[in-house]
Image: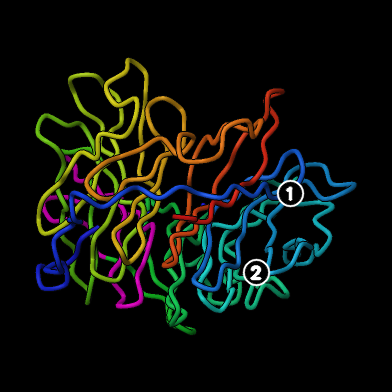
Amino acid sequence: MGTLAAAAALAGSAFASPAHAATPQYKLTIVGSSGTELFGINKNADVFGIAIEKGAKVQEGFLLAAGTTKMVFLGSPGDPANTNSVSSPDAINAGADIVGTATSFATGNQAAVEWADSATPTDLGTKLGLQNLVSSPELTSINDNGLITGFGSNRGDVGFTINGSTVTRLPALPNGGVDVEPIAVNNSGLIVGQADTTTSDFQAAAWQNGTIKALGMLPGSLTSEALAVNSTGQAVGADVELSDSDAHAVLFANGTVTDLNAPGTGTPGGDAVANAINDNGVVVGQGGNGHAFVYQNGQATDLNSLIAPGSGFTLLTADGINGNGVIVGTASNSNGQTFGFELTPIS
């Protein structure tokens, strides 16, 4: 299914590539049956998302291990078959540990869940007493060291981290900060997301070593958010501009905010968002034209133009990319049914 932190953490190499480098073509693999969506991929090429299990009422979370074809569906605490609830995964790490939420059909109550090694679901909210901090907690990311981020409601949105059995509340922005929503974390513990103040709407923010920093926004913008961060501290997300009230896919790096000019940006009603970035600085997301895009070598390209024609599918959104450049997301066929897709670079 995630900007920059302290200046030292964000002082990595500039986001740039040789101008002459060519954008690669991709081999398309459709994953799952109708109703499948892919949210992310780890460095080992394990993927996760949601799909419709036989006999299920709604889409449920699943893991598909690399090199396999059988989805392992993620049960809910006390309801492993998801007959009375639904699992909703948000993030995966290199060890195939998945975090997210599970929601009861009967009560609507939401549990913060970890599927360690994609096995038995654990309600971390109950186990760690998150109810003393927030209601309706949601786990949003997990890094390879097991550090988890999340947020919940308590007179505003309260952000927190989970490190083993230790829950730590994340600070708000100064000058009356209210809401805190961490979305992604890298292996150095740099967290990105969004936060607000009593006088401003949400803006992209980063947390590291107990401090918070606003990451800024494009000139003349209403809001911004960071949705993903790589190992060098480069983060990506979206920025809503006042001029058109549309979202623009952006990069937060080295103290600046850059519009990636995703396909369809500037089209009335065309919202674009950058969903993921790998350690090579390659960005993927959804353009304002409603198609998946990739940004590399200084240019954003519609991914539909980089696969063999005649597939019968339209790539709608790209939500994950790993270090090998393998991209996952959601496509649709001519009947409007959704399927997961995986793109492997071939040139």
Image quadrant for the C terminus? bottom left
Q: What count of labels does the image hold?
A: 2
Determine whether the residue tagged by mark 2 lies in a helix, strand or loop. Answer: loop
Residue 119 located left or right of residue 57 = left
Determine whether the residue tagged by mark 1 lies in a helix, strand or loop. Answer: loop
Q: Nearer the viewer, residue 281 or 166?
A: 281
Location of residue 273 in the rendering, given as x and y in whole percent from the top left corner? 36, 39
Kind of residue indicated by mark 2? Ala
For residue 60, above or below residue 6: above
Residue at 14% x, 37% y: name it: 218
Q: Is residue 198 magenta?
A: yes
**Mark seen at residue 163:** none
> Quick one: label 2, few (<14), some, or many (20+) residues within 10 Å?
few
Residue at 43% x, 81% y: name it: 163
| The residue positioned farthest toward the right in the image shown | 55
Residue 267 located left or right of residue 109 = left
**Mark seen at residue 66:** 2
Q: Which residue is identified by label 1?
A: 32
> Residues under labels 2 and 1: Cα distance?
14 Å
Location of residue 277 in the rendering, given as x and y in whole percent from the top left corner? 35, 57
Residue at 19% x, 45% y: name it: 197
Q: Is residue 136 magenta?
A: no
> Quick one: label 1, few (<14), some, or many (20+) residues within 10 Å?
many
Kind of residue indicated by mark 1? Gly
Residue at 30% x, 71% y: name it: 231
> Does label 2 or label 1 sit earlier along the sequence?
1
Q: Which residues are magenta?
A: 171-199
Location of residue 66 in the rendering, given as x and y in whole percent from the top left corner? 65, 69
Q: Nearer the viewer, residue 292 or 57?
A: 292
